[in-house]
């Protein structure tokens, strides 16, 4: 009887330790994967650059739900970015544009857009799998440029 | 003539004052008339006085204080002792008790942790535009999409005539 009570106490403490460890750093060691894309937004149905492909349907659908005035988005460049818990990873999308992703734990990420070597904007937010963050601006000819960061894993 | 047993007992009862009033008068008259009865009554009275005077004082073989101290010790031996003084728990038992109490507390903490969620507030959602004070953010929770729209550097570079290669 007393031994069972003793064992139950030990197991309870072990449970507390486990929950605290998970609460402190959930998902530690698992890779965090992102898909980053540089897009060009236009109202023209076709891009003058034949290498540009239309963005995939899933991202296109999300973009249509945002307050953007363009009807077509073409992929200029697309990269995969992989980081680990607590790490910071940088990936270039063009000569002037790069994205830096830092895991802050608990599904929070710090996303930094770097333009011409300087940090332009830094955003900290939760980013569950499937959610996207779009950083964009106007481009010549009433078009736009967009960097789409999507967490895939 | 010899006196019968019943008469002898009646005389004894008379001497002890145990007879009713009518019998007492009758026996008194009888004693007054009968010499044998008078003699027996006198003998019985003497015997009683002798017995009363013969009750000796009982003396203890030890002193009074020692006798009562033995009585007190016997009483104390038979009384149950208080539990707290009966046995001091061992260190292992005390440790186990502490652990059980701590286990109960740990259970409460575990439930609280599971109910509340991860520890600490941690970093919260925020945004800082280092180069563009005109930037705005829009988040659509249903679409699971966040838009950060910048006026800089694109438009500035357009104004400077340096936007041709902004994407490349």
Image (cartoon, rainbow, N blue to C red):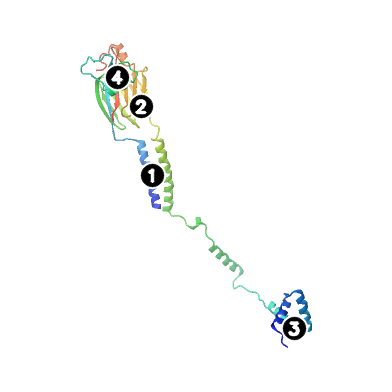
Image quadrant holding the C terminus of chain A, namely top left
Q: Earlier in the sequence, mark 4 or mark 2?
A: 2
Q: Disc 3 to disc 4, how far (Cα)?
A: 149 Å
Quadrant of the rendered image containing residue B36:
bottom right
Residue B24 image position (x, y, % from top left): 76, 76
Nearer the observer, disc 3 or disc 4? 3
Query: Which is nearer the eye, B122 or B6?
Result: B6
Label 3 is found on which chain of the structure?
A: B
Tag 1 and tag 2 share a subunit: yes
Query: Residue lying farthest bottom?
Result: B1
The circle on residue B37 is 3
- Please indicate, yes or no, whether residue B4 appears anywhere in the rendered image: yes
Judge left or right: residue A48 versus residue B64: left
Q: Disc 1 to disc 2, how far (Cα)?
A: 33 Å
Label 1 is found on which chain of the structure?
A: A
Nearer the observer, disc 3 or disc 2? 3
Label 2 is found on which chain of the structure?
A: A
- Would you name the residue on which mark 1 appears? A13
Residue B88 image position (x, y, % from top left): 47, 55
- Would you name the residue on which mark 2 appears? A125
Question: Residue at the location (43% across, 45% down)?
Answer: B104
Q: Disc 3 to disc 2, how far (Cα)?
A: 131 Å
């Amino acid at each position: 009887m007393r031994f069972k009570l003793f064992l139950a106490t030990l197991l309870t403490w072990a449970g507390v330790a486990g929950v605290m460890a998970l609460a402190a750093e959930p998902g530690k060691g698992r890779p965090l994967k992102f898909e980053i894309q540089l897009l060009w937004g236009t109202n023209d149905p076709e891009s003058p650059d034949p290498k540009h492909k239309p963005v995939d349907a899933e991202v296109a659908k999300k973009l249509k739900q945002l307050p953007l005035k363009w009807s077509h988005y073409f992929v200029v460049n697309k990269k995969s970015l992989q980081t680990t818990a607590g790490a910071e990873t940088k990936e270039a999308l063009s000569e002037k544009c790069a994205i830096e992703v830092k895991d802050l734990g608990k599904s929070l990420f710090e996303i930094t857009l770097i333009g011409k070597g300087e940090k332009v904007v830094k955003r900290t937010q939760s980013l569950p799998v499937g959610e996207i963050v779009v950083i964009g601006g106007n481009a010549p000819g009433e078009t736009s440029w967009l960097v789409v960061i999507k967490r895939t894993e | 003539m010899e006196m019968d047993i019943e008469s002898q007992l009646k005389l004894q009862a008379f001497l002890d004052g145990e007879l009713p009033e009518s019998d007492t008068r009758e026996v008194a008259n009888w004693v007054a008339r009968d010499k044998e009865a008078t003699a027996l009554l006198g003998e019985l009275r003497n015997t009683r006085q002798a017995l009363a005077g013969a009750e000796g004082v009982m003396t203890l073989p030890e002193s009074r204080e020692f006798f009562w101290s033995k009585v007190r010790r016997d009483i104390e031996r038979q009384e149950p002792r208080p539990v707290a003084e009966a046995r001091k728990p061992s260190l292992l038992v005390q440790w186990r008790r502490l652990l059980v109490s701590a286990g109960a507390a740990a259970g409460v903490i575990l439930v609280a942790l599971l109910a509340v969620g991860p520890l600490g507030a941690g970093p919260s959602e925020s945004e800082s535009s280092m180069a563009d004070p005109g930037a705005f953010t829009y988040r659509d929770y249903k679409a699971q999409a966040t838009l950060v729209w910048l006026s800089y550097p694109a438009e500035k570079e357009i104004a400077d005539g340096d936007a041709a290669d902004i994407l490349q």
